[in-house]
Image (cartoon, rainbow, N blue to C red):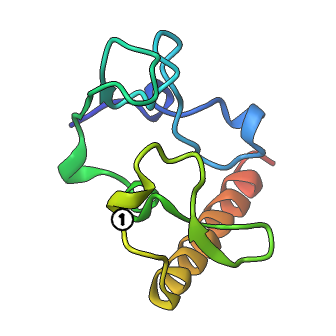
């Protein structure tokens, strides 16, 4: 898949230089979720599932502002996932550090 990054991420000017997946203006869902509905419980298929980013692979497990791991309350099917683990927390902390490092490098490249 060779999509320009600008086609599936929010503008860097809106995210502080951090690459962030965009939502479809039609469905408000991830741009990679193939669905025609804005209903959060609507059926859809992720068309990059095999290649999805790490943040998607770990969802609905996320970190809060204090780096505590939990299942996102916004997930429409939380009962379909096991409780968050310390291993997932460590993985998400590493992902967060990598994202911050890339963002800093991107910002330095703009100077």
Q: Number of callouts in the render?
A: 1
Q: Position of residue 20 (x, y in %)?
A: 58, 43
Mark 1, secondary structure of its residue:
loop
Q: How crowded is mark 1: few (under 14 residues within 10 Å), some or many (20 or more)?
A: few
Give the residue drawn at x 41%, y 27%. Answer: 31
Give the residue drawn at x 73%, y 62%. Answer: 104
In the figure, 81 relative to 52: above or below? below
Disc 1 target residue: 81
Q: Position of residue 77 (x, y in %)?
A: 40, 49
The answer to which of 10 and 80 lies nearer the viewer is: 80
Q: Position of residue 68 (x, y in %)?
A: 69, 78
Q: Where is residue 101 in the image (x, y as percent from the top left)?
A: 66, 69
Left or right position of 64 against 73: right
The answer to which of 30 and 51 lies nearer the viewer is: 30
Quadrant of residue 71 within the rendered picture: bottom right
The answer to which of 70 and 13 lies nearer the viewer is: 70
The answer to which of 44 and 97 lies nearer the viewer is: 44
Left or right position of 91 against 62: left
Give the residue drawn at x 54%, y 74%. Answer: 92
Give the residue drawn at x 30%, y 19%. Answer: 35
Image quadrant containing the N terminus:
top left
Farthest bottom residue in view: 86
In the figure, 99 relative to 33: above or below? below
In the figure, 109 relative to 67: above or below? above
Quadrant of residue 45 within the rendered picture: top left
């Amino acid at each position: 898949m060779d999509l320009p990054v600008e086609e599936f991420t929010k503008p860097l000017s809106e995210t502080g230089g951090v690459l962030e997946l965009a939502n479809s203006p039609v469905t408000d869902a991830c741009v990679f979720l193939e669905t025609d509905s804005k209903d959060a419980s609507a059926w859809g298929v992720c068309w990059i599932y095999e290649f999805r980013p790490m943040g998607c692979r770990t969802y609905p497990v996320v970190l809060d502002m204090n780096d505590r791991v939990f299942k996102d309350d916004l997930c429409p099917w939380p009962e379909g996932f096991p409780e968050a683990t310390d291993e997932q927390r460590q993985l998400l902390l590493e992902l967060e550090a990598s994202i911050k490092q890339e963002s800093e490098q991107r910002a330095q490249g703009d100077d």
